[in-house]
Amino acid sequence: MHRPSRRLILQLGGVTAAGVLGALAPAEAALTPDDSFTRLRRRWREVTAGSGYDPAAEPYRSRLARLGRTAARYRDTMAPARASLWPDEPFPSFMATPRRLRTMAHAFVLDGTGLTGDAGLAAAVAAGVDHYRRHVYAAGADPAGNWWHWEIGVPKALLDTALLVGLDERESVALRDAVDHFVPESRLAGYSGTSTGANRVDLCMVLLLRAMLRDDHGRAARAVAALSPVFPLVSAGDGFYRDGSFIQHTYVPYQGAYGVTLLSGLATLFAVLRGSPWEVTDRNVFDAVERSFAPFVRDGACMDLVRGRGVGRRAFGDHERGREIAEAVLLLGDSAPAAQRERWHAMVKGWAVRNTYRPMLADAEPAFHARLAAIIDDPAVVAAPEPVGHRLLPMSARAVHRRPGWCAALSMASYRIGHYEHGNGENLRGWHTGSGMLYWWAEGHGDQYSDDFWPTVDPYRLPGTTVSTLRLPDGAGRAWGDTCTPWRWVGGATDGTYATVGQHLSGLESTMEAFKSWIFLDDVVVCLGAGITAADGTSVETIVDNRRTATTLSTGPGWAHLDGHGGYVVPGGQDLRTSRESRTGGGATRDYTALWLDHGVDPRAAGYVYLLLPGATRAATRARAAEPGVRVLANTARLQAVHVPALGLTAANFWNAGTTGALTASAPCAVLVREHPGAPATITVSDPRRALAELTVAWRGRTVSFGRLADAEGASRTVVLR
């Protein structure tokens, strides 16, 4: 194997010595002017490029050899010209060209690629970085287009590449000056605009890499200090909320995209800086793993309702994001207390062993593969099962309900949270994802929304939604998630097992208005709609479901059943309509079965009731149609409520103060009452509008007062009636 010369080792400022050779004598390992930065660069290489595995063992040997072949092809086809570095990637090529250079750098520093320590490859990479810096990323150039490329994407990739292969004095100074031009330190002076959340973490990482390039103590300290606004919980704007919500772009729940970037970035910084003079000491992000991210990962896939505009980028993107969350969690675990680390290992192992659609190990980078494989193979780590319970996140208008064998998740819009996000030409038809879209998975349906669902589904018939069929233009509404409704009543009450959730809905760019409620139980979701009104000159529909399947559809009086999926009960003589079609989009064709209720053209106070039975058999569905087990107490624009005798449960969404049966509320609120045989009843309430100084609830002659609910940010409070 070719090894770099001592002269090249000195030229690369210790990175090659620490990263490629790995076993130099102590005198050689101390050749850089600053030992702190020598260790930092070594640690950067170990964490980001990879370590902790045997490069001669499979699957690493084959993957590293493939990396080497790819890097050799890039090296051999590199043809520097005024308008490109590779002929097939004309400038500015913000993504592809820096990515190719970084691939070559990884082949240089990693053992087993066939190009490890190859001086010619290192020289080609250094020349490529300098060429791109001179022709695209030059100090003084006009940063036209998306700011992100100039301040995060390009400098992060170029600096990473430069640190892996090393640059000579002239090249490193020139790259430093270019980065300082586009990302001045003043960029981190305030925490606002595009310098919050995940963007802030990325900007801090760019500043740290810039410090590592030129041994700059001051910039390293400022990069870490500038992370401080990311950690505290917030009550408005971008960031983490105490209910587990994570918001970016002001209006968008984003654990599955920007949140992944933030978590991955912080995990990397914790790992790289541990034991250095700039070690990160704030530990608040550790709580976010289980509070903010885990609720939206099911069997290793990250749910689309927290993935913003990126849901339709490619098939199985939800599984990719789930893998990235798992990778970040395991890396962050190295810096976490032992008890948390053990829980995270069990949780990630559970995700991995249950993910049979896109196995995590199949596409994992070597370092993550080695880390995850060790946990999977360790009998002392017991895979955690899917949790059971309800998580309601009112500050992001999201809910996740888990029961044995199935899971459901709800996406709503409010005065704080947009209907959907579009931007940069993405997600242009996601208009109705905030109109009460109800995702659900039963056993064996882990790919339901993964396998080209978004490019092929009818965007006017998303499951669970109530929509005006008024045709909308691509990208309707303002970009970047600024598509909020005017209504504050969005949220609900949960005791951690069951929940009543509601949404006062306005249609996107339509006159449609509706009051929608969902009661989440053991084997059923009870769905109510009332006050459905519109004046668009078009019909309004409630989409009971739209499954990506062509399996057998059976129907009977008041029920329908999809073989292998579940059942639907539609009481009261409502006309359940169905359709079967193949739909094409994005180069894919998929089969769909849609079930919906047509409320007619310009309805006035229309309504609906239906029961969703995830995983139910045909026989169970028919039996539930004969005896629903749920009694609807009210279904109006003032109050929606049900009683479930078998559970001793009464659930109500009071859109106004009112009474239903034995339950009275003095103001708009959500209420969940549980009566337990031989035990006191419990009352759980919330103020979804975040407007109440006090609420009085009466149940069977007993009155309970709740104070300062507005301060609870929509969270539920429970009282035991003794």
Image (tube, rainbow, N blue to C red):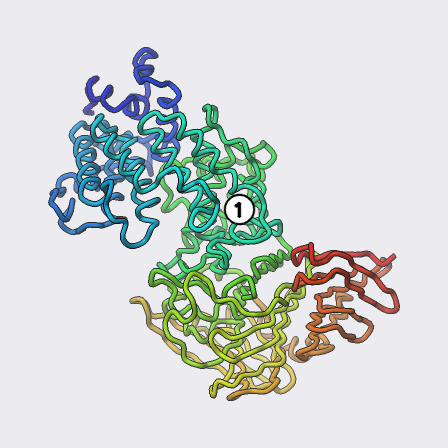
Q: Quadrant of residue 657?
A: bottom right
Q: Is residue 369 visible?
A: no
Q: Secondary structure at mark 1?
A: helix
Picture residue at 59% right of the left edge, 87% below the top: 604
Q: Is residue 693 left or right of residue 619?
A: right
Q: Position of residue 608 (x, y in %)?
A: 61, 80
Picture residue at 54% right of the left edge, 64% below the top: 411
Q: Quadrant of the C terminus?
A: bottom right
**Against 169, is 708 above or below?**
below
299 or 192, nearer to the observer: 192
The type of residue carrying mark 1 is Gly
Q: Is residue 493 left or right of residue 177?
A: right
Picture residue at 74% right of the left edge, 77% below the top: 633
**Against 599, is 220 above or below?**
above
Q: Is residue 267 visible?
A: yes
Q: Position of residue 392 (x, y in %)?
A: 62, 58
Picture residue at 28% right of the left edge, 49% below the top: 143
577 or 537, nearer to the observer: 537
Q: Quadrant of residue 200?
A: top left
Q: Is residue 720 left or right of residue 452?
A: right
- Would you call the spot at circle 1 few (<14 residues within 10 Å), some (14-19), or many (20 or more)? many
Q: Quadrant of the N terminus?
A: top left
**Residue beneath disc 1:** 350
Q: Position of residue 330 (x, y in %)?
A: 48, 38
Q: Position of residue 640 (x, y in %)?
A: 69, 75
Q: Quadrant of residue 212?
A: top left
